[in-house]
Amino acid sequence: MNNETRDLSRRERQIMDLLFRVGRATAAEVMEGLPDAPSYSAVRALLRILEQKGHVRHEEEGRAYVYLPAVRRDAARQHALSHLLKTFFDNSAEQAVAALLAIKGEKMSEAELDRMSRLIDAAKKEGR
Amino acid sequence: MNNETRDLSRRERQIMDLLFRVGRATAAEVMEGLPDAPSYSAVRALLRILEQKGHVRHEEEGRAYVYLPAVRRDAARQHALSHLLKTFFDNSAEQAVAALLAIKGEKMSEAELDRMSRLIDAAKKEGR
DNA sequence: GCTCTATTGCTAATTTTCTAGCATTTGCTA
DNA sequence: TAGCAAATGCTAGAAAATTAGCAATAGAGC
C-alpha cells in the first residue's frame, strides 16, 4: 500500500481531504462536498480507484457503501504535518507555532492558550 | 490568478511543493528534486504550464530561467496551514500543537521550547 | 404489490496530464 | 574559431485522469 499523497491526482486528493475532514462518507456525501462536483457515477468511479490503490476502504451500511480513509487519521495527520513543516517551515516547529498563532491566536481563549503552554511544559520535562 | 492548491494536478503539486521548499530553482534543479523525475524537457513543459496558470513566475539569470512561486512564501504557508488545520485537526490549533510536539518535541532544545512558550504568552497578552 | 428512487458494478469516451523529441540559440572552453 | 553542452520554445503523441451512461438490483413508501 502506497500512502504517498504526492502521488494523488487532483480529484483523488480532493476526495482524500474530504474523507479525512469528515471521517467517513457515502458516495453521495462525497459528491456534495467536492468543488465543481461531477456526477454521482463519476464520484463512485473515483472512489473505486482510490480503494484499488489502497487509500480508501468501504463498509456497508444497509445497501450503501460508506467510505473512509484506509489509514488512521492520527497517522495521516502526523504525515501531513511533517510534510507541511518540511515544505513551508524549514522543519521548524517554532516557526509553525508562530504562523499558527498569527492565524488563530486572536480567536483562541485563554484556556486554550494555557493548555498549549502546558503541552510545551510537558515536552520540556520529557526532554530533560 | 487562481492559487488554489486543490486544483493542482499530481506533477504540478510536486513542483509547487519543491519550489516552496527551496524558494527558487532552475528547471534542472526542479528535475533533480522530483520523485520519479521525467526528462528535462518534460519538466520545462510543466513549468511553462504552471507559469501560464499563474502559480509560478521566472526570472532570468544569465541565460537560464530561475523559477519561483508567484505567491509569497508566508502567504502560501498560512494558506497551507489553515487547510491542514481544517482537514486534520477540526480547526483546532491546540490539537495541531499537540501533534507537532509528538513529532518534534523530543528533538527540540529547551531554548526552542522556551521561545514557543513566549509566543503563546504574547498571544495571551494580545487576547486580553 | 407496485412504483420510484437510490444504489451498485462496469465500461467506454472524453479530457487532461504528462512526456520527450526537435530545431534553434547561447555560452564556455580548448 | 569550432565544438560541445546547456539552454529555450514548441509540438505532438502517449498515458492517465475524469466523466457519465447503462443495466441491474435493492430498499422505501404508498
Image (spheres, coloured by chain):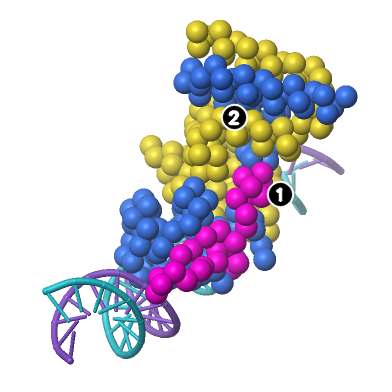
Chain colours: A yellow, B blue, C cyan, D purple
Q: At which x and y percent is residue A84?
A: 54, 39
Labels 2, 1: front one? 2
Q: Chain of mark 1?
A: A
Q: Nearer the viewer, residue A128 or B98?
A: A128
Left or right placement of residue C9 versus residue A23 in this view: left
Q: Nearer the viewer, residue C5 or A103?
A: A103
- Magenta range is B53-79
Quadrant location of the N terminus of chain B?
A: bottom right
Residue at 79% of width from left, 17% of height from top?
A111
The 10 Å Cα crowd at callout 2, few under 14, some 14 to 19, many 20 or more, is: many
**Residue that carries the numbered disc 2 in the rendered image:** A94
**Residue that carries the numbered disc 1 in the rendered image:** A32
Quadrant location of the C terminus of chain B?
A: top right
Q: At which x and y percent is residue B35?
A: 36, 51
Secondary structure of the residue carrying numbered label 2: helix
- Residue A106 in the magenta stretch? The answer is no
- Residue B57 in the magenta stretch? The answer is yes
Whether labels 2 and 1 share one chain: yes
Q: Nearer the viewer, residue A124 or D19?
A: A124
Judge whether residue A21 can be spotted in this image. no
Residue B29 lies in quadrant: bottom left
Left or right placement of residue A33 versus residue A45 in this view: right
Q: At which x and y percent is residue C12?
A: 45, 69
Q: Amino acid at mark 1?
A: Glu
Q: Amino acid at mark 2?
A: Glu
Residue at 67% of width from left, 20% of height from top?
B117
Residue at 73% of width from left, 38% of height from top?
A103
Q: At which x and y percent is residue D12?
A: 37, 83
Q: Is residue B18 above or below residue A81?
A: below
